Amino acid sequence: MPTYKAPVRDIEFLLYDVYDAETHYQKIGAEEASRDMLSAIIAEGAKFCEQVIAPLNQSGDQEGCTWSEDGVTTPTGFKEAYQQYVENGWGALASPVEHGGQGLPESVGHIISEMAGTANWSWSMYPGLSHGARATIDLHGTDEQKEVYLTKLVSGEWTGTMCLTEPHCGSDLGILKTKAEENADGSYAITGTKIFISAGEHDMAENIVHIVLARLPGAPEGTKGISLFIVPKVLPDGTRNDVKCGSIEHKMGIHGNATCVMNFDGAKGFLIGPPNKGLNCMFTFMNFARIGTAIQGVASAELSFQGALAYAKDRLAMRSLSGVKNPNGPADPIIVHPDVRRMLLTQKSFAEGGRAMIMHLSQLVDIVHSDVDAEEKKMADELLSFLTPIAKAFLTEAGLEAANLGVQVFGGHGYIQEWGMEQIVRDARISTIYEGTTGIQSLDLLGRKVLMTQGGMLKNFTKIIHKFCKEHDGAKGIKPMVKTLATLNKDWGDVTMKLGMKAMMNKEEVGGAAYDYLMYSGYITLGYYWARMAMEAQNKIAAGEKDGFYKAKLDTARFYFDRILPRAEGHKLAMLNGLDTLMAMSEEEFQYL
Amino acid sequence: MPTYKAPVRDIEFLLYDVYDAETHYQKIGAEEASRDMLSAIIAEGAKFCEQVIAPLNQSGDQEGCTWSEDGVTTPTGFKEAYQQYVENGWGALASPVEHGGQGLPESVGHIISEMAGTANWSWSMYPGLSHGARATIDLHGTDEQKEVYLTKLVSGEWTGTMCLTEPHCGSDLGILKTKAEENADGSYAITGTKIFISAGEHDMAENIVHIVLARLPGAPEGTKGISLFIVPKVLPDGTRNDVKCGSIEHKMGIHGNATCVMNFDGAKGFLIGPPNKGLNCMFTFMNFARIGTAIQGVASAELSFQGALAYAKDRLAMRSLSGVKNPNGPADPIIVHPDVRRMLLTQKSFAEGGRAMIMHLSQLVDIVHSDVDAEEKKMADELLSFLTPIAKAFLTEAGLEAANLGVQVFGGHGYIQEWGMEQIVRDARISTIYEGTTGIQSLDLLGRKVLMTQGGMLKNFTKIIHKFCKEHDGAKGIKPMVKTLATLNKDWGDVTMKLGMKAMMNKEEVGGAAYDYLMYSGYITLGYYWARMAMEAQNKIAAGEKDGFYKAKLDTARFYFDRILPRAEGHKLAMLNGLDTLMAMSEEEFQYL
């Protein structure tokens, strides 16, 4: 298994060189997030992730979770690590002070999430999944509900889940069947089966608070008839509720996390938020959950990169084409070979570019949650809405590619479980599926975010890129990048216009173009973050900074622009070729045996 | 697990509509491969693959192989299926009559290999791996060696392996350490450890014939000092040889196939071929082994497509954007959605395009092995040499992508083992690694095949495409495809010229461009096969043929040209951006923690 080391240097570069975190935290009234405070948190978080949970990553995969009538047992060490996490206050880090949290901004929580997720994604899902339940109750719960559930969720003594999916529906929640019937005491009897419930049952906390989507009697059909219910495993009076884990799934990866079938057999539930407005309530924090999954993309790329880099420096094979580099050995380390470097740099550019994107989004989340003026909050919220599907889909696709490259760098050894590289692929594989597949994110981006706003949300972002390019037009060292970015940025608008015209003639064009549009947008978006980082690195170098970190940053940016960004062109050409060939075939014509 | 059905209709289309198999088999003197004969073989082969080995695919993955001191036990049913395979003469199908084979051409064997490999790749590797040993002995063995080993290998009573890789070397065989010291009786004592030996030990056959790469005392260093030895598990006199399986690997996939660590402890071996010429001897059939692996790409794409298609017709989610398609159900089947169709058509275009490429290569193999005139054989051999790295690397990369798309079509269910879709990804993942990684194939293509022949080998192929485009310039129905192909074909030469110029200045440019060059070449190459198929389909349609198969073929070709082929542009732009950003960083600069 790759030995995980938290990329503290890169995180600090983003915080202070790129995103001016000190000003940001002052602006949102989070002065407590001082540089000293953050350094201490990051250092302690890194230690916890490197020393406590990373060592459980491979053993957790091999051991997996065990189901019995009495519940689910998590892999050896998971429970103890979680206790330590709770005792050290990590769960409460970015939660509101009034419920026992430390009140630090979400962006600080995301830094810890990335480190924990890279160290051990399966483990990190247990605390990670509580976020949805916590946010739902915080935003839509009554004072009483907050009092009963929130403090324990914030401390981490209890964990939470979101129960959406049913055997027959995942993306299409409009057809869900779980029903909620009112009891005499004003509570509801919840009956139905939910599947794919991550951390639905486990032995790490004394109670699990499920937020369940269900239908009230006579509710409208479709998505307008869904309500939300709090269904705790243990009721406030201490009795065990009628919600049981029927089985756990055998999955490709994330074996350390229990993916549960949850049977609600007239379980007692409490309505949260207005009846039939469940999906609206959920959308209020959907962006945040999706950023949480986008982080898995960064985590996969980072962990696989760290493993592949160590191996590439160590493994000897062939001689460099430009002359022997390791004369005392029987061959050169494979890192001398250009194609191995291409793979490593692809991983690196996705991990660091993705981290830069996540940190920007995290700051937008901070702003949305802050008391800055309404106009700025609205701007941040819109930008966040636009960038979230890109982050979720593009960064997880990139993370999966990076994880596969990590296996490839190892050659045959990458395929062997012992080395831990194939586990990263298996764990990463779910990231392009859950919290909305790449296809769903693509429709969200092109349909809802871009075309439904007549390009307005896109313009919010392309204006920022335009401004950046204008300001750094003739900038030494990064000029070619700025030029390329400016061209693509203009192109992005033009392509969108063309698609919009087509979509007016035929709505299906949106679905036909959506995936390629998302990937195209993703490559350009990451290009923007790389250009920003390159600009800061160049400034440091120009100011005489000798730290090789800045040169490496600039080199990686150039690599991204030279060798990765050209893929945008392929996606553009594909989507502009339109829908016809997708729809030409009848169902029957797909296969002749 | 997807229920496998052999794509017999597609195979027959390729044989008779596209490649004129009757003329081909007459030309190479294989008149016995008549249409009736082939139909019978394909039908029987399909039955065996669908009914006997496909049902063992998922159970074999779950059960895996078991190691003990006494040997390796294969999954339940594998041994019995293999006995049936041997008894029915499948192993002997395309082997020489003089050693008990049926003497049918290799191309017929490849058709069965694809069907068996799609039904159960792990199982199919046991007979598949014998090919290398059989070919080595056939081409380089003494008459005595042929008598002792070949008949049993041909019948399948014995299986064979190729023992190349050692713990410290895979791609770089020049540094291998296994040694061979001459015994008094003229045999050799082989000592060393070989790893990743597929089917190195198992319970399916009474003897296993290892072909082992080792060094004679005082042999030159590097690849020029490697010799080949036959090392049978059981010696001709019936005694057990000192070769033991030390352990089996725990792998990401192909669990049904035993990947063995083989310890040679002074094992008795017999030199085959001239001393120190082992690698040359191996190259004589390397192309064939690589085509065998290229077939895994087609198999992965086909099996995953079959599974995803069935699911997409069955699973209901959302309504079609252009109006309800399934008014009696709660939602439409997901095959109505353009993005689901994009995924299915990508799989289909890779499976069928890849099959067309493999069949062309198989016919070239037939010609090389036949008694046609020397000039034609030379042409076929050169074309085969050029196309093989493309087939091996591009088709396995495409197969892995297709397998991942199959998981994606299933959504969350794709991640669950029970459905069998994630197994296809795990099994496919090795295909871009073994028999020479994608990186190694890329260097072989651009370095050895293209640039070392001053573009000669490329021209052999681009001339064929040029001729095709010229002949079908104004062809109704396929005109836009022909035009695109002609442009790309010219482009291919131009791009190659540019890379050649760069490589003259700096050899490393070859390594820097190789991967993108291979993928670029792969997309164009598959474009050629799709255009050929489209042309034949269009001819049938023009002749009044109503079979929907032809329309579907034409539609899939158009999809490939519209939506997949544009990726070639991205690879082209990336490779032309050159080497600089790959080499800019020192080893140390890759990571700052």
Image (cartoon, coloured by chain):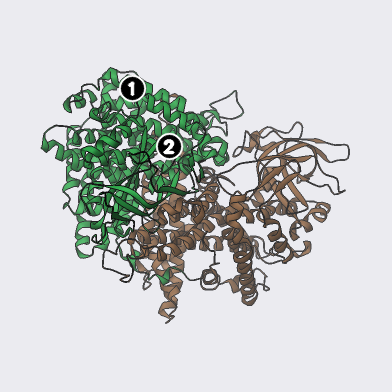
Chain colours: A green, B brown
The one of B419 and A145 positioned closer to us in this rendering: A145
Q: Amino acid at mark 2?
A: Trp
Location of residue B6 (image quadrant):
bottom right
Label 2 chain ID: A
Could you say which quadrant of the image residue B188 lies in?
A: top right
Tell me which amino acid carries mark 1: Ile
Q: Residues within 10 Å of mark 1 (few under 14, many from 20)?
A: some
User: How many discs appear?
Assistant: 2
Image location of residue A167, percent across then percent down: 40, 57
Residue A345 visible? The answer is no
The relative height of residue B138 versus residue A590 in the rendered view (above or below) is above
Q: Position of residue B33 (x, y in %)?
A: 65, 72
In the rendered structure, the residue with mark 1 lies on which chain? A
How dense is the environment of label 2, judged by Cα within 10 Å: few (below 14), some, or many (20 and up)?
A: many
Residue A513: percent from left, percent from top: 29, 56
In the figure, is residue A222 to the left or right of B483? left
In this view, A573 is above or below A79: below
Residue drawn at point x = 46 percent, y = 29 percent:
A80
Q: Which residue is mark 2?
A: A121
Sequence-earlier tag: 2 or 1:
1
- In depth, the one of B189 and A137 nearer the eye is A137
| Residue A285 drawn at (x, y percent) | 25, 42
- The residue under the point 62% across, 35% down is B169
B353 to A33, vertically: above or below: below
**Mark 1 sits on what residue?**
A41
| Viewer-side residue, A11 vs B295 | A11
Q: Quadrant of the C terminus of chain B?
A: top left
Are marks 2 and 1 in one subunit? yes
Q: Residue at x 42, y 38 (%)?
A: A300
On the rendered structure, is B243 left or right of A110?
right
Q: SS at mark 2? A: helix
